[in-house]
Amino acid sequence: MFVFVLDKNKKPLAPTHPARARKLLRTGTASVFRRFPFTIILPDTQVKDSQVSEYRLKIDPGAKVTGIAVLKSNVVVWAAELTHRGFAIRDALTTRRQVRRSRRNRQTRYRKARFNNRRRPFRWLPPSLNSRVQNILTWVRRLSRVCPIMGISQELVRFDLQKMQNSEVSGAEYQQGELAGYEVREYLLEKFNRCCVYCGATDTRLEVEHVKPRSLGGSDRVSNLAIACRPCNQAKGSQDIREFLAGKPDVLNRIFAQLKKPLADAAAVNRTRWVLFERLKATGLPVETGTGGQTKFNRIRLGLEKTHWGDAVAVGSSTPHRVIVKVVKPLIIKATGYGHRRMCNITKFGFPQVNKKGELAVRSRVKKVYGFQTGDMVKAAVPKGKNAGTHVGRVTVRKTGQFDISTSIQKLQIINHKYCTPIHRHDGYSYAT
Ligand SMILES: [Zn+2]
């Protein structure tokens, strides 16, 4: 992946090839500014505004993982996959609620019951969803600081219903793979659960099918389209659906009910995406939006693999016809949060956890141990013993100075602090390649 470069005033320059960055570091012209994302600083250079070309940040927001890619016209220079902690937040809030309720019922410690009497701010999002939006905004901000980003592309909706209902898609288009037709086909596959509406076949090529045939005046509107396997499609031919399913009234009723019902999209994803769109616009950068159908169409056309960052590359209509991918491994970013304020761990009943001797293990108020904090990325050079070697990973500190280190492949225990060197201080995320 390309390396981000800053000038002496910490203004972003064009990202550079890793080989050139290594050379600059070796000769002492540059020094490392940040490890994640890898950024170098040129203390003797000052950027001129005319020197910097335009970079585009592309985002494919997902419920669990968000794909991020940085493109310079048709070159993918940087990519990442950002794992959210939405479900962890939801679980933590559920646990807290249950523990408080149980305490209230047992009357061990009184905490006044709160009712649903709080006013929610405009465009309020539940904490788990809000964290996803905030994660993405954090990374947009961080990348804008190290890369001259001039525009953002975001996948906003899975299917553009407006476009599909209004544009008349002719027969040739959805068979020949034009985008509008492609979007319709993807939508229909999703709507009818990727199986033939007549016989329920799944492992076969499914075709777009007019419920009321065009020869009988049926329209191309989505409400008149279904998905059928080739044998069924041909058997039906130009018959009306009532005629074709004369002997199967239950199938006929089911299809009519399905046709009327629009696709119930994943509500969480849609809701967060609109809020994200509003907040991205507030950054002042021009935001281009695309649909999920378009993303898949572009990704297949570009021959990219189905990955989150590959999807991000294919977001929006600004996607070039060919891309050069200079990313070997995307940066794997995982949102970890900043820990909790609980002074000791609790059992599932909300009681403080004790050790075998019956002692309460109270957590220390001090977060830093020998200058390290849980979540720091460290490099540990262990000279001897079971864990001998050099390891890079996220540290979990202990008061004793014997740390744990989670690398991308293993979890090492009892590493002495004196073998550790900090490379990146805890910032709410963990990193791997
Ligand atoms: Zn069939």
Image (spheres, helix red, strand yellow):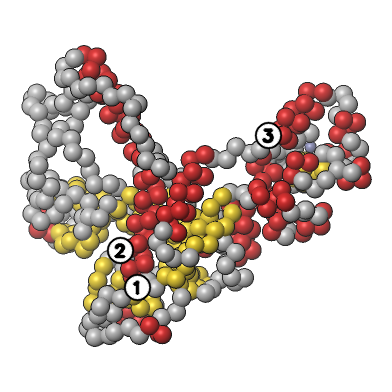
- The crowding category of the residue bearing disc 3, from other C-alpha atoms within 10 Å (few below 14, some 14 to 19, many at least 20), is few
SS for dot 1? strand
Name above or below for residue 43 compared with residue 97: below
Q: Amino acid at mark 3?
A: Lys
Q: Position of residue 299 (x, y in %)?
A: 59, 60
The verdict on label 1 being within 8 Å of ligand 1 is no
- 25 or 178, nearer to the observer: 178
Residue at 12%, 47% (x, y): give it: 367
Residue 48: % across, % down: 35, 85
Circle 2 crowding by C-alpha within 10 Å: few under 14, some 14–19, many from 20: some
| Mark 2, secondary structure of its residue | loop
Numbered mark located on residue 4 in the image: 1
Ligand 1 within 8 Å of the CB at mark 3: no
Is 310 or 275 nearer to us in this picture? 275
Q: Which mark is residue 134?
A: none
In the image, ligand 1 is in what quadrant?
top right
- Tally of marks: 3
Identify the residue shown where x is 58% and y is 49%.
158
Inter-mark Cα distance, 1 to 2:
10 Å
The foreground one among 160 and 383 is: 160
Picture coordinates of residue 134, whole percent (x, y): 36, 51
Residue 191 in which image quadrant: top right
Q: Quadrant of the N terminus?
A: bottom left
Q: Are marks 2 and 3 in contact (CB under 8 Å)?
A: no
Residue 124 in the image: above or below residue 170: above
Q: Nearer the observer, disc 1 or disc 3?
A: 3
Instruction: Examine the rendering and report whether any part of residue 26 can be seen.
Output: no
Q: Earlier in the sequence, mark 2 or mark 3?
A: 2
Mark 1 residue type: Phe
Residue under label 2, please give it. 36
The disc at residue 261 is 3
